[in-house]
Image (cartoon, rainbow, N blue to C red):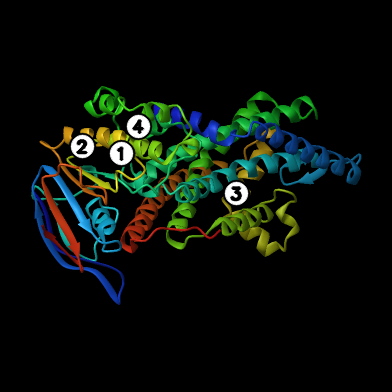
Amino acid sequence: MLKIKNVSFSYSEEKPLFRDLTLSLTTNGLIHLEGENGSGKTTFLKILANLIIPKEGSLTWNDRSLSNSEVTYLSSINESSYPFLKGLETIELFSRLNFNNNYKKTPWWSTLKKSTLFCEALEKRYSDCSTGMRQLINFARALTKESEIIILDEPFLGLDKDNQKIFEEVINLYKEDKLTIFTSHRSHNVNYDSSLKVFKGNISHV
Amino acid sequence: MFKTLIFYLLLEKRNIYINKYIFPLRVLSSLLNMIFYYYAAKAFLPNKDFFTEAGNTNLFEYVMVGELTLSLVSDSLLIFSHHIKKILNFNIFDSLLNTKSSMYRILLQNGISSLILSILLIITEMSMLYWIFGLTFPLLNLFGAIITNLIFIPLFISLGIVSASLFIIFKRGTSLMGTFVTLLSLVSGVYFPIETFPKIFSKLLVNINPFQFLISETRLILSEGLYSPRYLTYIVVVLLLNIIMSFAARSILSFSVRVYKRRGTKIWLTS
């Protein structure tokens, strides 16, 4: 179980974003995180991904302190990559950084390969890729990290219907044995298990 | 680790030589530099040798050995800041932080692969000195000088990682590091002997500036095949410093990453 206990965070002293946030989440399933723009969704996801250290409070995963190795994080599309690398080289680089040489044998790889856009992106330099291509490459490079929690920040941005379906297919592969949390303003077609809402510095189950 | 290093090397090659003219242009600029010093040395000291602490050596050789040693050191110092800057500007810092590799390991692999390419450039420059300007050194001396330089590299790599860490906290550093390297070249006898400084100052530099030692020792070993009496003591001190500094660099880098995570905001570089 993912336990968030008394977490507080603020970018400035005057305006706290989260105050005394306490929440428990199951060890598997697909959770949709909703909230208005600027409500703190990305900050919350970054706290879960250990990219932001909260001012106060603790995060535990199965009664152990939540560490970087337990979370895979796909940042929103404005996160970029080395522009001079081809899609496949980017994925290869991240697979090495994640000590995963067998990513091509995984179900997510064969599912993503169904997308012609993804196959095209593998051979293109990142700088020449479209937004959708970049999103698929970023997703694949994030998945080279094997972990128990997957965090996806606006994963469907820039994707057309067909590619969004493939993306969802990959997410569904891990519904049973991983906890996946995602934010999206285009979630109406996604079959998620539960939903969380960020509102005025608090997060609650919907 | 080794395979990843080779992979990085190939990627780095693509990055640096994205413009296929960059390598030939760098070689050409080195050649022009050499021609400049060759004729300058000839014009100012047509018949005499230039006396230095490294024995009787020719002015052209004096400057060239100083410059090549400087380029190895300055590359070790600057490459890491360059990489962290690239990572931050490409907006990939968070994604790299989320991998299973530490930022120290990522920077080290990136930097060492770049350094290998710098060494290739230095070898090209040395070949030019040999073939075009007839500057030759006995093979054994050359080997001794290379080993001495290699012993110092980890120290400069650690300093480079410290400077890269400053980028993460202070968002700037290129100009600072550039100024530091220029200062280093002035107080280390790259272009002129430090004996020309006031005695107290030059004595102090001899004792506390490891780069000055590296340059003068490289010259001495290359031209005379001699090792100064302080050689062994200094090497032992540098080896110890290598260990201490690598721990310090690692700690400073992880501290700056922690500061970044606590701050929670993106880093936008200003220089």
Measured as percent of width and height from the top left, residue A25 is found at 10, 51
**Between A5 and B258, the one nearer to me in the picture:** A5
Q: What chain is tagged by disc 2?
A: A
Locate the N terminus of chain B and report the quarter of the image it occupies. Answer: top left
Mark 3 lies on a secondary structure that is: helix
Residue of label 2: A171
Q: Which residue is mark 4?
A: A96
Find the distance from the CA under tag 1 to the CA under tag 4: 12 Å
Q: Label 3: which residue?
A: B211
Q: Amino acid at mark 4?
A: Arg
Residue in the foreground of this view, choosing between B123 and A58: A58
Look at the numbered discs 2 and 4 and tell me whether their residues touch, using CB distance below 8 Å: no
Label 4: state its secondary structure: helix
Eye-nearest disc, 3 or 1: 1
Q: What chain does badge 1 belong to?
A: A
Please, what is the three-letter code of the amino acid marked with disc 3?
Phe
Mark 4 or mark 1, which is nearer the start of the sequence? 4
**How far is disc 3 from disc 1 in space, using C-alphas?**
42 Å
Callout 3–callout 4 Cβ contact below 8 Å = no
Q: Which residue in the protein does label 1 denote?
A: A142
Instruction: Assess disc 4: are there few (<14), some (14-19) or many (≥20) residues with their C-alpha within 10 Å of its C-alpha.
Output: some
User: Mark 3 to mark 4: distance in Å?
Assistant: 35 Å
What amino acid type should be assigned to the residue bearing mark 2? Ile
Dot 1: few (<14), some (14–19), or many (≥20) neighbours within 10 Å? many
Tell me the residue at 27%/36% (across/down).
Answer: A143
- Give the chain letter at badge 3: B
Q: Residue at x 52, y 41 (%)?
A: B153
Discs 1/2, front: 2
Residue sitting at x 62%, y 60%:
B204
- What amino acid does circle 1 point to? Ala
Q: Is residue A187 visible?
A: yes
**Relative to B20, is B2 on the left or the right?**
left
